Structure formats: C-alpha cells, structure tokens
Amino acid sequence: MPFSRRTILKAAGWGALAGMTGGCDDIGGIFGRMFAVPPRETTYFTPNGKFYVVNYADSAVSMSREINIEQWKLHVKGQVKTPLSLGWRDILNRDSYNQISTLMCIDTLPGGDSMGNATWRGISLKKLLQEAGADDETARDVIFRGIDGYDDSIPFKRAMQDDAMLAFLMNGEKLPKEHGFPIRLIVPGLYGIKNVKWIVEIEVYPGDHLGYWQRKGWTDDATIKVFSRIDSPGHYQTLRGPEQKFRGIAFGGPNSIGKVEISFDAGRSWNDCQIEPPMSPYSWVIWNYSWKPPKQGKFQTVVRATDTKGRLQIAEIVRPQPDGASGLHTIVAEVGTIENKSG
Ligand SMILES: Nc1nc2c(c(=O)[nH]1)N[C@H]1C(S)=C(S)[C@@H](COP(=O)(O)O)O[C@H]1N2
Ligand SMILES: [Mo]
C-alpha cells in the first residue's frame, strides 16, 4: 500500500479544502474516487491503542529510553514558598479523580483525526501549586518541562482552575509510554501542544514564557477552535436506499457544543442535527442526522457546529499555523439508488 490510512485522510482533508475554494465539483475532479475515504467509526472514547500520537523531533531519543520509575522525580520550583520534589509513590498517594476530556492536536485539518477522547485519572495541579505555596502576586505563567526537552506553559490563572490535571491513568490503564508516562498535563480546551507529556519539572514563572512551539512562531494562547466532522458515510461512498444515516463528532474546545448543522447543497441551506449528550463539559459530542436523498447524484455535504456561547465554526479556510486550522469538513455523498431493493 503506497498510502497509510492517515495519509489518505490528510489528502482527503486538503481535497475538501480545494473543493471549497474552487466550487462544487472540484473535489471529484482533483481527489475524487482515487482518494475515496472509508467511513470512520464514531465512538465516545478512543481506545488507547488507536489514540493519535504527536511528538516533536527530539522526543524519539527519550522515547527509546526506559524511565526508571523508582528514580523518577517531579520537581516544583520557581515562585513558590516550598519547592517540592515528588516521587512516583508521592503522586499515587495524593487524592486523584477522573476527568473525561478530548485532546486535539493544533495540526488537525478540517475533517482531520489527530484527536481523541479519554477518561484521564490524575491529581489536581491547583492543589499541588497551593501546597508548594505558589505566589499568586508574582506568578504569571506555569512552565512544564518534559524529559525529552519539550516545554510549554499556561497562564498561572489557567493552571489554578479545577480542570487542570496531572494525569497518570488513561482509560483506566497506566498512562502508555507514548502518551507521557509517568505523568502528563491535561488542560481541557487548549490544543495538544499545551498538554505536556513526560513531565519532570513544573516552574511557577514571573514572566511570559515562550515554549518550544511558541519559539517557532506558534500560538501561546492555543484555545481550541470550534470543530466538527463527518465520520460516516465516507467521502464518495456509494449510498443506496431511501434513508441515509450521517454521523460524526463536534467539539467546542473550552465550551460545549450547542448546535450542529448539516448541508447537502454546499452550504446554501442547513438542517439541524440531533446531538447526543456529552460525556463531560470537556468532551466532544456525537451528532446524527437521518437524510432522505431527494434524487440520485452527487451532493456536496458540509457540517458546521456552534458552541454553547454562540461561537459558530469558522468557515474560512486557514492552515494550522500559527493558531489552529479552520474551514468546514466537506464530503461528496454519492447517491446511487434511492429505491429499496425490495421495492
Ligand atoms: N514532552 C512532550 N509533550 C508533548 C509533545 C512532545 O513532543 N513532547 N507534543 C505535544 C503535542 S503537539 C500534542 S498534539 C500532544 C499529543 O499527545 P498524544 O501523543 O498523547 O496524543 O502532546 C503534546 N505534549
Ligand atoms: Mo499537537
């Protein structure tokens, strides 16, 4: 196979973008059947083995080394009264809790799949910072450093919210190595870049710190943009029968999803989708729509979401750099026959 599944989806993503700018039939012309995309399964939770992995280039070195958990230490330092040095057992002895939240890479294209939803179990970042006596007069950022040399920061005020978690379990299993064992940051509503893995050092910092990706020109704010995608049917999948089930996910980043709409005429008219209740305020939602195709043919099908604060997903096609992509996921629904075989 010359293309991995991921490559095909990426190509289809850009194909959709080309179609949006060029008009109705460009998708077919440029990427058409050659890049037909199989339907994706829509589930609330992403199994650990299928969860996307993104590491910056230098992570490979540390990924290849085994972490000796008996020697591993987490240091809390900077603008704190009492610097802390915690071992693995100290982490496990602290109060921990579960939180369901969606993680999404800033590189995700419209319709992309560099995202996943999991139940994370971990300890409260806020309580740890309080215990260290973080000085809220001088603190501006909190910096997280991974064993691979990666670093990023979040504002101190964000770090002191209850949903910022240092996670050590993922979907009930020990945090897998590729996802940041022994601990990683989970900060809902902010792109993956901020969710530092393999943390060994937390520094309360009096200034505005620029992390690894910020030093390369990427966003420091990293608030996730409203996103939605069509998982099924697949792009250019031939549809047969009088009724077709459309299904996918929508994600509002820091806010829940209030509305999902689908269009079968390239965005001229919109229909409200049914939304399944979210697993938590920080998780994606699943949407469904049952469509009765009016006739045979190709239908330019587009989805868009609105969050609970009324933010409509941005239709303008923007590349991921510097602060996350926008643009609506578009597929071609190809209706073969609408009569039932039985007549
Ligand atoms: N230490 C470290 N943390 C990191 C990264 C990294 O390269 N090193 N990549 C970041 C990026 S860009 C993303 S999208 C998420 C991906 O998390 P995952 O691999 O568990 O899905 O981790 C983030 N945390
Ligand atoms: Mo990312």
Image: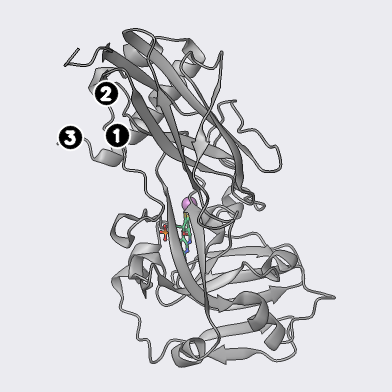
Place residue 245 in its image quadrant.
Answer: top left
Q: Where in the figure is residue 63, as x and y percent of width and height?
A: 33, 69
Under tag 3, what secondary structure? loop
Asked if ligand 1 lies within 8 A of label 3, the reply is no
Residue drawn at x 39%, y 12% as measured from the top left: 26
Dot 2 and dot 1 residues touching (CB under 8 Å): yes
Q: Nearer the viewer, mark 3 or mark 2?
A: 2
- Mark nearer the viewer, 3 or 1: 1
| Label 3 vs 1, first from the N-terminus | 3
Q: Name the residue under label 2.
A: 237
Mark 1 surroundings within 10 Å by alpha-carbon count, few (fewer than 14), some (14 through 19), many (20 or more): some
Residue at x 82%, y 74% (from the top left corner): 138
Where does label 1 land, which residue?
39
Question: Which amino acid is tagged 2?
Answer: Gln
Q: Position of residue 83 (x, y in %)?
A: 66, 89
Judged left or right of residue 255, residue 41 is left
**Amino acid beneath label 1:** Pro
Residues tagged 3 and 2 counted as in contact (Cβ below 8 A): no
Q: Name the residue under label 3.
A: 2
